[in-house]
Image: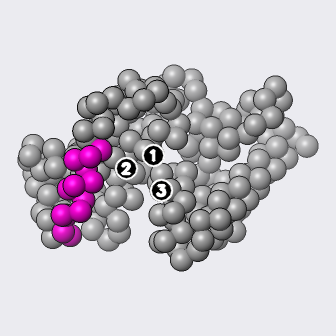
Amino acid sequence: MPESALNRQHIEETERIKDKQSDPQLVEMINQCIQNDRKAQEYIYRCFFSSMYHMCLKYTRDEDELTSIINDGFLKAFKKMEQFQFTGSFEGWLRRVVFSTLADYFRKKNRGVAFLEIQDNGSSDAEALNKLYFEDLVSYLHILPEMTKKVFIKYHLEGYAHNEIAESLSISEGTSKWHVFQARQILKDHLTKHQFGQ
């Protein structure tokens, strides 16, 4: 579904803000959000709407769902803003809050988040694998090689694009894609073996 005019406006505004944003300003806005300052909350929302939108867009193309999930995610983030300890990326923290909201939404709708993107439709294994929930996925991440796990988390749980992952981990985009593919295969094989008795 095409982006609405409102969402396009949010995305364009987000990019303008990010270009001018300085770290001290972001820290100040976060601190004001902790004090429940509405203007600071609006600033954070406008600043990070685009990246949250594109993360959720991987899992649903329904514009109403997207808006509902993103808004709920930001509301949850604002309520727990004091939990952010300034020891890592704020955007990464926010992505995890919004992604958890996304997983909760699908769980309530009795829909799994298709992390593994299994293509062999019609298979009972594929159907079950595509209903892998957030907690299930996290519990299996320890079986992945370290770099593969890092890439998979950044791509699927934090919503980064392959070019962003490549830059942050000093690897190529092709290598990033390979790690995601490798993680899916390892998780699929592991789940098939342990959940379906093969």
Between residue 14 and residue 30, name the one nearer to us.
Answer: 14
Please check the rendered image and state whether residue 96 is part of the magenta-colored stretch, yes or no. Answer: no
Most extreme residue toward the bottom is: 170
Query: Image point 22% across, 47% down: which residue?
Result: 13
* Label 1 SS: helix
Q: Mark 2 points at which residue?
A: 51
Q: Please give the range of residues in magenta.
A: 11-23
Q: Name the residue under label 3.
A: 160
What kind of residue is marked 1? Met
Q: Are marks 2 and 3 in contact (CB under 8 Å)?
A: no
As shown in the figure, which amino acid type bears the numbered disc 2?
Ser
- Nearest to N terminus: mark 2 or mark 3: 2
Looking at the image, which residue sits at the far right?
198
Q: Mark 1 points at which residue?
A: 55
User: Element under label 3?
Assistant: loop
- Say which amino acid is labelled 3: Tyr
Q: Where is residue 195 in the image (x, y as percent from the top left)?
A: 79, 40
> Measuring 32% from the left and 71% from the top, which residue is drawn there?
87
Magenta segment includes 17: yes
Percent x, y of residue 85 = 28, 65
Residue drawn at (54%, 77%) of the image: 170
Mark 3 Cα shell of 10 Å, populated few (<14), some (14-19), many (≥20): many
Task: Quote the CA–CA distance across marks 1 and 2.
Answer: 6 Å
Q: Counting other residues with Cα less than 10 Å from the Cα at mark 2, is it few (<14), some (14-19), or many (20 or more)?
A: some
Tell me what residue is drawn at x 62 percent, y 52 percent: 139
Disc 1, disc 2: CB below 8 Å? Answer: yes
